[in-house]
Amino acid sequence: MSYEMQDVASMNADAFESVMETYGEDVWNYLYMMTRSRELADDLAQETFIRAYKYMHAYRGEASLKTWLLRIARNRWYSYRRLAFVRKVTLPGNVPETSASGSAEEEFLRAELTSDVWKIVLKLPLKYREILMLRAHYDMTMEELAGALGITVSAAKTRLQRARRKASELWEKERGEA
Amino acid sequence: MTKKDIDWEKELKQKPFRNNSFTPQMMRRVEEKVKETPRRFELWGRRAGVLTLSAALLAGIFALESGGILDGLRQKPPQAAVTLPEGNGPRTPANLGFPLKDGAAGSAVNVPLTVVKANLAVDDGESSDALPELPSVTFALTEEEASALQAALIYRPDGERGYLLLAPRNWTLSEAQVGANGSFGVTWTNPDNSGGSDDPDRSGEKLTYTETGTVGSVVSGIGTYFPERAEWAEQKAFPPETREGMTLRSLYSNDDGTSGFSRYDWTRQGEGAVASGAVYYSLDKRTYGLRHMEMTLRGTAYSGAADTILRFFEANEGAQRTESVPGPNPNEESQKGISIETVKQKLSESGMKLTFRQDRDLPFYDRPMDGVHEEEMIIDRNSADAADFERLTVLSFDSREKAQAEVERIDRTFRSSAGGEGPDIYPHVFSEGGLVILYWTSGSSETPFRYDNKIKGALRALEQSEVQP
């Protein structure tokens, strides 16, 4: 399903539901892969759509709606990380630890992951798993990647190459240990 | 499957999870939330009336400008001689000469001068009583105006730049403070009408001046006094304060909106007092900040003085600044260049050490930086809570140009945090040669920003001027 820019800009709250139905899963999955926490992905995905609705008039149609939503999701995640530090400083112990509920997350992954390749991606450092996912799963072009990550196209290419290599090394290692 | 077999682009096309975790319940919550909150353009419509008024006001100002009516206010009269206090002499009042308005060339009129040392919220113990040189004063006064005024030179014991302001004659300077985050201010009260703590609803007559460089106060302040910037401030998650009963008297900004001036009158609701104020903002990285002066009056006895004081503020875009003075122990390292080891040593002398971030700690800033990976260090004042304290991010580039490019990029990143992302952690950027150091400070509406002068002092040794994002 695609949306025309004019449709998006003038969309009301009821019509916005179709946007969430179409892209909710993509946004949540992206956030989970970034945060490795269902709780955070739940919260940040909702924040992403609330913010998207609020600023829908600013959507210019330069990127696809999905890319635009992913960019907002990414901003929410980075914003959360900055805020998390303040919470840690001011309210010690009040920050949800992303690794605290480890066994529940592991159980979720065991039941829900569709393939071992995703397990490998989840083990990559943040910057590698992000670029690999955006490129491979979300079909972003190099230019879109560069724009979303705030780097040059050549830097995006280099990082993607490294991400593939790291992922392959990890894959080999896991296979060797198995 | 072997290493060579993996085609990640192909393998990752499939969905990562079997089921959709973005549930209908989450959608309902989003819908409920968005129905509660008006969108940006809807707010714009509501504010149209205010903006129209602002436009009319601006049009009026331009008409006055083009008619030359404001020329008198902006005129820079010739500089007159000033009576300088002795460099390290007693802090007794002296006189400061101002050019005499409409007087013969070189003629001056004296205003009593008080010299005041500011209190530092964070004192590194290396205080200096060296007075700064008085700045050249070009603002002209009539004899009548001068007779109603006093001048105050506020200087800082840490050698940072001081400032000069005008205040009503005989009013009492009650405090001159420099906050932990680098903000500073001063307050005068009218001893004959100072209000009283027993009657909080009846505030007395006072004059306050504040200058701040923290993002929250600058952005929200701009939104309050510059209506065309209110939307921008709100988008940056710093909603402006609404002041009912405030009327803008003057409002202008430069072409690209990076600096502006506003003057207003504010009838305080239910208190019977009228405040007249002036605000200047700058988004330029060298002068980033918000300067604000406000005079609260009951009656008209000091209206003339208030007007002159606020015009002095306008002429100087805030307080008139002095030059910084060398501290008691000039930093020899700054003369011969500096390394991260020197910074470590300086902090160590102040009882702090730097430790490298552990894997469990999220980095503050791990965005790509020209291929250079950051080294993030925690400023360890007390090993028990070192992980949660302030940090420095250090980047070593192989050239000054690359370092400078990164400084500019960081500047853009933190200024263009669009979509309502207000930075709650704020980097102060220092650089010298190929070294770039971000000193992260934090704060929120509940907790004031912490900006440690000891750390700042150690980092200042890196360069002569700090870059403000």
Image (spheres, grey):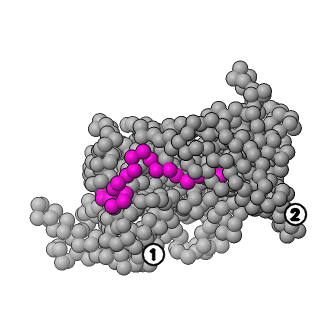
Name the quadrant of the N terminus of chain B. bottom left
Could you tell me which residue is drawn at 63 percent across and 47 percent down? Answer: B84
Could you tell me which residue is drawn at 80 percent across and 40 percent down? Answer: B148
Secondary-structure class at tag 2: loop
Q: To which chain does the residue with label 2 belong?
A: B
Residue to which mark 1 is pinned: A144
Callout 1, which amino acid?
Answer: Glu
Q: In the image, which residues are magenta? A: B319-340
Which label belongs to residue B69? 2
Q: Nearer the viewer, mark 1 or mark 2?
A: 2
Callout 2, which amino acid?
Answer: Ile
**x and y, in percent, of residue A6 in the image:** 65, 73
Most common secondary structure along the magenta stretch: loop
Report whether B106 appears left or right of A28: right
Residues at discs 1 and 2 in contact (Cβ within 8 Å): no
Report whether B250 appears left or right of A67: right
